[in-house]
Structure formats: structure tokens, C-alpha cells
Image (tube, grey):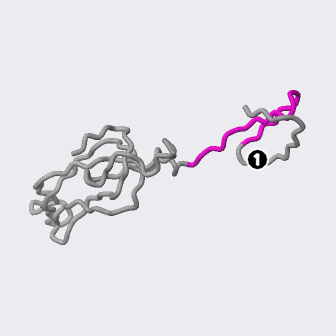
């Protein structure tokens, strides 16, 4: 495994999910994606093996056998998030690379999917009459003097 830290920015090239093959073996499925920026949020251990279905009716009685996974191994996956409020995804070690797809955007590259609240702007048209504009509001202002943005 790579030496990565929680909070480190990485490039993700594939997402992993747990599934079953045609013989009831639990396996890791790899789904390739367009490279995206993400943040490491932790690690998760998932178990591999043969799944045996339950037998014996509705779960009552002496002949009932519960479902079980005969564990044959495990795999450690990285947990990553593409944005602050996005869900966590599992990623294999080979599908991670430290860095950023868009380093010129800084920290915004990770949180681009978050809705952004427009800033509140105060324009000073004259010292006696400041005009405050809220997000989404449209006002027509005629300036007579140089504008001071605060």
C-alpha cells in the first residue's frame, strides 16, 4: 500500500465496489472513471470468499441454515470523497495517485460540486449612501466617483 494520509489530495482513476461473480464468490469490481480529484478519508477492510445461501424455509425450525460468507481473504481499500458533502467511495491502491487533476484551482478543485453561496457585496457609491447587494439580487447603480469594494 502507498503511504497516504487522511486529508491528502489524490487523483482517482477507478472506483471499486463489492459484488458476486457467477459462482457466488465475493469479489471486488473495478469501475474505470474519468480521473477526478478527491480527498483521502480513511481505509476500509472488505472480506472475500464464497457466499452460501440460507436453506430451510422461513427461518424457523430445526432444518434452517442461515446464510454465511466463508471468508477466504480480505482486501484493504482507500475511502475517498470527491466533495465535502458527497458520499464516500472505495478505491484500490493501484487506482490512486497523489496530486491533483487541476492544481491551478487549489482547494476549489475538490469541492467544485458543492453549491456555492454568492458573496454579499457592498458598493460605496458615495460616503453617504452605501448600497448592499444580496446574492441573486439585481440593482442598477450609477457611480459618480471611484468605487471602493469592501
Residue 144: give x, y in percent of width and height: 90, 37
Q: Nearer the viewer, residue 85 or 3?
A: 3
Judged from the image, the secondary structure of the residue bearing numbered disc 1 is loop
In the picture shown, does residue 27 fall above or below 23?
A: above
Q: Nearer the viewer, residue 96 or 76?
A: 96
* Residue farthest toward the bottom in the current orientation of the protein: 22
Q: Residue at x 29, y 55 (%)?
A: 95
* Neighbourhood count class around disc 1 (C-alpha, 10 Å): few under 14, some 14–19, many 20 upward: few
Mark 1 — residue?
137
In the picture shown, does residue 105 fall above or below 29?
A: above
Q: Is residue 93 left or right of residue 133?
A: left
Quarter of the figure with the C terminus: top right
* Residue farthest toward the top in the current orientation of the protein: 127
In the picture shown, does residue 17 fall above or below 104?
A: below
Residue 48: give x, y in percent of width and height: 16, 56
Occupied quadrant, residue 54: bottom left
Stretch in magenta: 115-134
Quarter of the figure with the N terminus: top left
Q: Is residue 120 left or right of residue 128?
A: left
Occupied quadrant, residue 7: top left
Q: Residue at x 32, y 47 (%)?
A: 79
Q: Residue at x 25, y 62 (%)?
A: 19
Q: Is residue 118 left or right of residue 56?
A: right
User: For the image shown, how many numbered marks are present on the structure?
Assistant: 1
Residue 86: give x, y in percent of width and height: 45, 49
Residue 18: give x, y in percent of width and height: 26, 59
Q: Residue at x 41, y 50 (%)?
A: 87
Reply yes or no: does residue 29 show up in magenta: no
Amino acid at each position: 500500500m502507498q503511504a497516504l494520509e487522511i486529508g491528502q489530495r489524490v487523483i482517482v482513476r477507478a472506483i471499486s465496489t463489492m459484488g458476486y461473480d457467477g459462482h457466488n464468490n465475493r469479489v471486488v469490481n473495478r469501475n474505470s472513471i474519468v480521473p477526478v480529484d478527491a480527498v483521502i478519508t480513511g481505509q476500509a477492510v472488505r472480506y472475500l470468499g464464497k457466499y452460501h445461501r440460507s436453506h430451510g424455509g422461513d427461518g424457523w425450525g430445526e432444518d434452517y441454515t442461515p446464510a454465511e460468507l466463508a471468508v477466504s481473504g480480505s482486501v484493504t481499500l482507500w475511502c475517498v470523497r470527491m466533495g465535502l458533502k458527497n458520499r464516500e467511495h472505495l478505491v484500490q491502491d493501484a487506482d490512486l495517485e497523489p496530486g491533483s487533476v487541476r492544481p491551478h484551482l487549489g482547494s476549489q478543485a475538490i469541492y467544485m460540486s458543492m453549491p456555492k453561496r454568492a458573496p454579499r457585496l457592498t458598493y460605496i457609491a458615495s460616503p453617504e449612501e452605501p448600497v448592499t447587494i444580496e446574492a441573486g439580487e439585481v440593482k442598477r447603480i450609477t457611480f459618480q466617483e471611484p468605487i471602493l469594494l469592501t
